[in-house]
Image (cartoon, grey):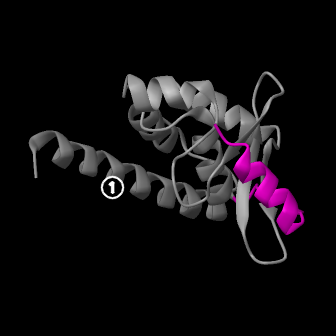
Amino acid sequence: MTENSNAGEKIWQTAEQLLEEVRRVYTQNGSLTDELLSALNFVFQAPLLPALDLVDNSHVTRLVSPSGRCLFQVVGSSGTPYVCLPSSIYCACPAFKFSVLKKNDHIMCKHVLAVKLSEAMGKTQRYDVSDREITNLLTHLD
């Protein structure tokens, strides 16, 4: 394992631990502590505040089909809905392609971070859709 991949793995472990801490603290207090927000800002940087804004404004929806398939739709600040996959950090937004994949200067875009935070805080809306609708969303991903 190279030094870069080892560092990347440690960042992911830290991010996962922070999101679990968000779940614990938010369940207990109904809010996040300044210390936790500071730690989240250190790890996630620029996407954090816009992601929290998306969560606060209920822009994260879990779409669930009768077959059990699900994905997330996050309405971005521009009003554009972006599809995020539940078991990955994929998002269909341009920032994901540029900042996460190309420049590698963020570990996830604000939409994926909003999904992770919304799920941890229990603030995700649920919307039942048909299997056909899920298929259509998935086939139109960039």
Instruction: Report which quarter residue 54 is drawn in.
Output: top right
Q: Farthest residue toward the left? A: 2
The crowd level at tag 1 (other Cα within 10 Å; few <14, some 14-19, many 20+) is few
Residue 136 counted in the magenta span: yes
Q: Is residue 125 visible?
A: no
Residue at 86%, 62% (x, y): give it: 132
Instruction: Kindly give the residue lying farthest to the front in the view shown.
Output: 139
Residue 130, compared with residue 7, is above or below; it is: below
Left or right of 3 in this view: 57: right
Q: Where is mark 1, residue-wise? A: 13
80, 31: nearer the viewer: 80
- The residue positioned 80% from the left and 41% from the top of the image is 59
Which of the two residues, 33 or 138, is positioned nearer the viewer here?
A: 138
Residue at point 77%, 50% (across, down): 137
**Quarter of the C terminus within the rendering:** top right
Spot occupied by residue 19 in the image (x, y as percentages of width and height) = 50, 54
**Which image quadrant for residue 25?**
bottom right
**In the rendered image, is residue 99 in sight?**
yes
Residue 73 image position (x, y, % from top left): 76, 47
Write the residue at 42% across / 56% down.
16
Camera-side residue of 114 and 131: 131
Residue type of the residue flagged with mark 1: Gln
Where disc 1 sits, the SS reads helix
In the picture, measured across the screen, residue 7 lies left or right of residue 80, that is left
Where does the magenta region start and end?
A: 122-142
